[in-house]
Amino acid sequence: MDNCLFCKIAAKQIPATVVYEDDELLAFKDIRPHAPVHILVIPKIHVATLSDCDASHTELLGKMLALAPRLAKEQGCAVTWQDGTPGGGYKTMINSGPDGGQEVYHLHLHMFGGPHPWRVER
Ligand code: 5GP
Ligand code: ZN
């Protein structure tokens, strides 16, 4: 997509602080973070919204979601009760369409984390 911001980030035409990359996905820090940790996970292919996805996107969507706990661990906000200690944790979110608060029309999964207090207003 010629005029898509996240396609340009995926193509490295616009800089971003990349925290993960593979053949299909890119994860980078949100430029206006709403939490101490705020990462965006995008597919490298252009998909405008979650509503443009169908069964053919199941594997891609699964990979995006499955990346969140790995990033959370790497960014220091894993759910620590798994280690026997209560605490930690993160939030995942996909905004879809104007009423869903979507601003950038290239599918992306938000991952928010870090020590409270912080609040995602959208
Ligand atoms: P949406 O509201 O579409 O779900 O989220 C878009 C997100 O993209 C926002 O949180 C916004 O801060 C982030 N964003 C917008 N432009 C850029 C940019 O140029 N670089 C980065 N890293 N994030 C951006
Ligand atoms: Zn795009």
Image: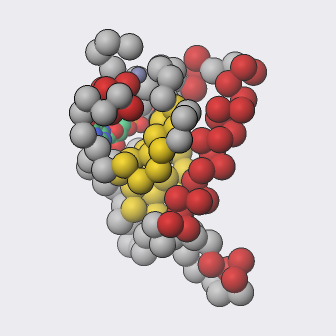
Question: 102 above or below 34?
Answer: above
User: Which quadrant does ligand 1 occupy?
Assistant: top left
Question: Residue 59, image x and y in percent?
Answer: 71, 32
Residue at 65% of width from left, 41% of height from top?
63
Question: 88 above or below 53?
Answer: below
Residue at 47% of width from left, 20% of height from top?
46
For the C terminus, give its image quadrant. Answer: top left
For the N terminus, give its image quadrant. Answer: top left
Which one is nearer the viewer's eye here, 25 or 53? 25
Question: Residue 111, image x and y in percent?
Answer: 49, 52
Q: Is residue 65 left or right of residue 74?
A: right
Question: 36 above or below 84?
Answer: above
Question: 98 above or below 37?
Answer: above
Which image quarter: residue 56? Answer: top right
Q: Residue furthest toward the right?
A: 55
Residue at 33% of width from left, 20% of height from top?
4
What colour scheme does the image use? secondary structure
Instruction: Count the labels in the image.
Output: 0
Residue at 24% of width from left, 33% of height from top?
14
Q: Residue furthest toward the front?
A: 23
Which one is nearer the viewer's eye here, 122 or 115? 115
Question: Residue 71, image x and y in percent?
Answer: 52, 59
Question: Residue 76, image x and y in percent?
Answer: 48, 72
Q: Is residue 98 visible?
A: no
Q: Residue furthest toward the top?
A: 2
Q: Is residue 77 visible?
A: yes
